[in-house]
Image: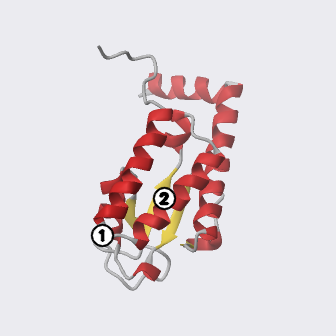
């Protein structure tokens, strides 16, 4: 545990880590802005950290369906309670979207704008398989531009 903390502290001292953290926040803010511009509601009207908490009650679906719908198209989120949520914690009125993994892969603010559009489009069409398949293709195309392990060559 002590060695792991030492490695983490050493990484945090590197100037590139500060830039990485800044990019995470910028991506998160860009995603939140895009969601709002596409008609979604964000809890607390924005974000100042690595997460966006989206209120999905306007889509007349719960967090379970929203999470499953987004999973189907390749966007991974978590169902999450929102402030003053009237729904059960097992099927809440919100989804939580994080940006650190996307930032690590190299996605930027313009990519976040596109992802915001895709999320809203998927939730608006949660029961339309044709639209969901189209969104899934767009997600795959975006993912292919930012491979998880670019140095890994599979033959």
Q: Residue at x 29, y 13 (%)?
A: 155
**Which residue is found at the position 46% from the left and 66% from the top?**
121
Q: Is residue 16 left or right of residue 117?
A: right
Residue under the image location 45 percent in, 16 percent down: 151
Nearer to us in this view, 88 or 135: 135
Q: Are marks 2 and 1 in contact (CB under 8 Å)?
A: no
User: Which one is nearer the viewer's eye here, 28 or 5?
Assistant: 28
Label disc, if present, on residue 41 of the rendered structure: none
Q: Secondary structure at mark 1?
A: helix
Report, in whole angstroms, how far the alpha carbon at label 2 lies from the one at label 1. Answer: 16 Å
82 left or right of 9 in image: left
Q: Position of residue 134 (x, y in %)?
A: 38, 55
> In screen coordinates, is 136 left or right of 38?
left
Residue hosting label 1? 65
Residue 117 coordinates in the image, percent (x, y): 54, 61
Give neighbour class at mark 1: few <14, some 14-19, many 20+ (Cα, 10 Å).
some
The vertical placement of 3 against 109, above or below, is: above
Instruction: Decide which of tag 2 and tag 1 comes sooner along the chain.
Output: 1
| Residue 84 in the image: above or below residue 135 | below
Q: Is residue 130 above or below residue 24?
A: below
Question: In this picture, is 27 found above or below 95?
Answer: above
Residue beneath label 2, please? 118
Q: Is residue 6 visible?
A: yes
């Amino acid at each position: 545990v002590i060695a792991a903390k030492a490695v983490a502290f050493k990484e945090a001292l590197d100037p590139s880590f500060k830039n990485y953290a800044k990019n995470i926040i910028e991506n998160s803010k860009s995603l939140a802005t895009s969601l709002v511009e596409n008609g979604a509601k964000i809890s607390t009207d924005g974000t100042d950290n690595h997460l966006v908490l989206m209120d999905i009650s306007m889509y007349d679906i719960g967090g379970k369906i929203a999470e499953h719908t987004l999973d189907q198209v390749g966007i991974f989120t978590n169902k999450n309670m929102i402030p003053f949520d009237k729904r059960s914690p097992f099927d809440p009125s919100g989804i939580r979207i994080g940006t650190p993994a996307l930032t690590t892969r190299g996605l930027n603010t313009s990519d976040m704008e596109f992802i915001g559009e895709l999320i809203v489009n998927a939730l608006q069409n949660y029961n339309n398989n044709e639209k969901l398949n189209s969104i899934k293709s767009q997600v795959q195309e975006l993912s292919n531009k930012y491979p998880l392990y670019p140095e890994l060559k599979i033959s």
